């Protein structure tokens, strides 16, 4: 596990990124899916137990259908968070 908050990043980012990664692991899917569901009116997900990172930025790491972990990014635009997470996963190989 690794957490890094870059200079100038909001302190909240150091809480959101791990929460988004945890959500991606628990759901075995990108955290954006939950944000989209809530935005579409499925507000019940706001009370889901143990899930706090219901925003875009969490991406699971999958290999051959097996969950290996997740990357959570927070601090820039949501779509950029996801692009950075996916780029990091690709860089890991």
Image (spheres, rainbow, N blue to C red):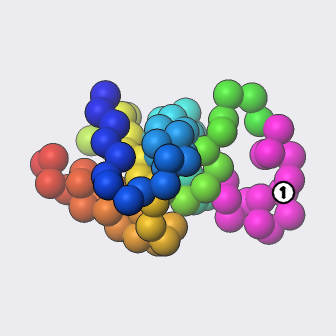
Q: Which residues are magenta?
A: 34-47
**Percent position (x, y) of residue 41?**
86, 63
The verdict on residue 90 being magenta is no
List x then y, in percent, for residue 76: 44, 67
Q: Quadrant of residue 82?
A: bottom left
Q: For numbered disc 1, what is the local secondary structure?
A: loop
Say above or below: 80 vs 21: below
Q: Residue at x 80, y 45 (%)?
A: 46
**In the image, is 87 to the left or to the right of 77?**
left
* Residue 84, picture quadrant: bottom left
Q: Residue at x 66, y 39 (%)?
A: 52
Q: Which sits in the foreground, 3 or 28?
A: 3
Q: Which residue is drawn at the image coordinates 66% and 35% (left, top)?
A: 51
Side of 51 relative to 68 (left or right) = right
For this rendering, which residue is in front, 84 or 41? 84
Q: Nearer the viewer, residue 18 or 14?
A: 14
| Residue 56 % position (x, y) | 55, 59
In the picture, which quadrant includes the N terminus?
top left
Q: Residue at x 49, y 71 (%)?
A: 77
Which residue corresponds to mark 1?
Answer: 42
Observer able to see residue 58 = no
Left or right: 58 in relation to 87: right
Relative to 40, residue 88 above or below: above
Quadrant in which residue 63 is drawn: top left
How crowded pointer 1 is (Cα within 10 Å; few <14, some 14-19, many 20+) is rated as: few
Q: Is residue 42 magenta?
A: yes
Q: Main secondary structure of the magenta part?
A: helix
Q: Is residue 34 visible?
A: yes
What is the number of callouts on the image?
Answer: 1
């Amino acid at each position: 596990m690794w957490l890094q908050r870059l200079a100038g990043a909001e302190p909240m980012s150091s809480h959101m990124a791990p929460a988004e990664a945890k959500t991606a692991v628990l759901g075995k899917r990108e955290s954006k899916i939950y944000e989209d569901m809530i935005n579409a009116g499925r507000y019940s997900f706001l009370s889901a137990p143990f899930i706090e990172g219901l925003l875009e930025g969490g991406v699971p790491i999958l290999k051959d259908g097996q969950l290996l972990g997740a990357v959570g990014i927070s601090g820039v635009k949501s779509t950029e968070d996801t692009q950075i997470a996916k780029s990091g996963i690709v860089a890991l190989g």
